[in-house]
Image (cartoon, rainbow, N blue to C red):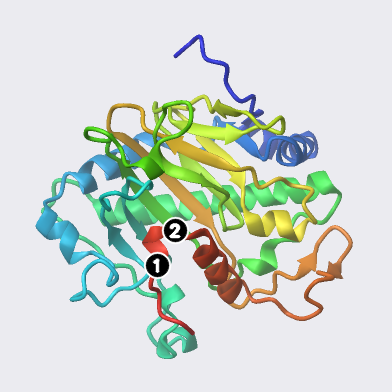
Amino acid sequence: MSSLEYFDIPVLDFEEALRNPGPGGESVVSALQGAGFMGLVNIPGFNVDKLRQCCQWFFSQSWEVKSSLMKKSFNSKSRNVYRGYFPVLENSPSRKEGFEIGADIPADDPDMISGNWFYEKSIWPPENGDFKFKATMLEAYDQLHQIAMDILKLASIGLGFKENCFEYLFRDKPCSTFRLLHYPSWEGSPPDNAVLDEGKAVTTPVHTDSCFLTLLATFQYHGLEVLTPEGTWLPVQPIADGLVMNVGDVLSKMVGGRFVATQHRVLDIGVDRFSVPFFLEPRFDADISMNVLNESKDENSGTIVKYGPWVLKRMEEKGFFEFKNLPKF
């Protein structure tokens, strides 16, 4: 793979950027308004092997265990509709299985009482003591959330704003999703809807992320490709010991498109592939209609735009199979 031409994403020494937030913020802004993607290395306290262990442990569980965690749209006996496990669907161009959690809120919180499934309690597999799966996942969730918020602080500084200008969106009850993914290679010929003109096959079709920003552990795996401004597809170099970060639709929207939510896809690489994304998301009722660059309302809305209903519509439009048939509010 060394002879491949890679999509040139800037790589940020995260510890150095935090130590010197002025130039660090400038580097973040340059990356987000250019490629829309950025590599992060030298992240204080970050251990990618823990995420790898979570993948290996979870996806080695029996089908019986996985089925017990399945979302209701895939198992009518389940009660969970938003968090939990989703299986590989045959003949779908999105060939992956996944397990996802969120941050639980108190049972007496009004959103829990009202049945707002964005705050559905995370569901967990049983453990036998061989690996502290739940504890490791929760620790990683907290760390990735903090890394994402630090990126937003650096971006704010680079834009010339107060470092906490995005913080209000995530205060109290962010809806962020932490996901483990396994992409099995296609067996035999993939379905026509997964085959590209150049003879390659996707395991995730082209899309942008609907969230605020994404942090992705790619481990050593290739397969992630980005659509360049010139209209060509190029692979992203794996960052084995760090993270790949990309801009989501909401962040791009709230800076008037200055930061780019770049289209990307995942290709079948001929072997099982694993990755771990963390999708930073505002709280359900956060108003995302504001353009933070000029402190004005979105001219197309003129009213409050709540993140939850907005992103649900967005996911429906994009046709993500793991979010189909969600209950309506």
Work out whether residue 172 or residue 294 is closer to the camera in this orientation and state it: 294
**Above or below 314: residue 140:** above
* One can see residue 45 in this view: no
The dot on residue 324 is: 1
Alpha-carbon neighbours of circle 1 within 10 Å: few (<14), some, or many (≥20)?
Answer: some
Q: Is 234 situated left or right of 113 in this image? A: right
Alpha-carbon neighbours of circle 2 within 10 Å: few (<14), some, or many (≥20)?
Answer: some
Circles 1 and 2, Cβ within 8 Å, touching? The answer is: yes
Residue found at x 49% / y 27%: 239
Q: Is 283 situated left or right of 53 in this image? A: right
Residue 83 occupies quadrant: bottom left
Residue found at x 77% / y 81%: 303
**Above or below 33: residue 149:** below
**Above or below 198: residue 326:** below
Work out whether residue 203 or residue 307 is closer to the camera in this orientation and state it: 203
The dot on residue 320 is: 2
* x, y percent for residue 281: 56, 62
- The quarter of the picture where the N terminus appears is top left
Q: Amino acid at mark 2?
A: Phe
Work out whether residue 97 or residue 83 is closer to the camera in this orientation and state it: 97
* x, y percent for residue 34: 74, 36
Q: Amino acid at mark 1?
A: Lys
Q: Is 245 situated left or right of 133 in this image? A: right
- Provide the secondary structure element on which disc 1 rests: loop
Residue found at x 34% / y 38%: 274
Residue found at x 77% / y 52%: 257
Name of the residue lying farthest toward the top: 3
**Above or below 326: residue 187:** above
- Provide the secondary structure element on which disc 2 rests: loop
Q: CA distance from mark 1 to mark 2?
A: 7 Å
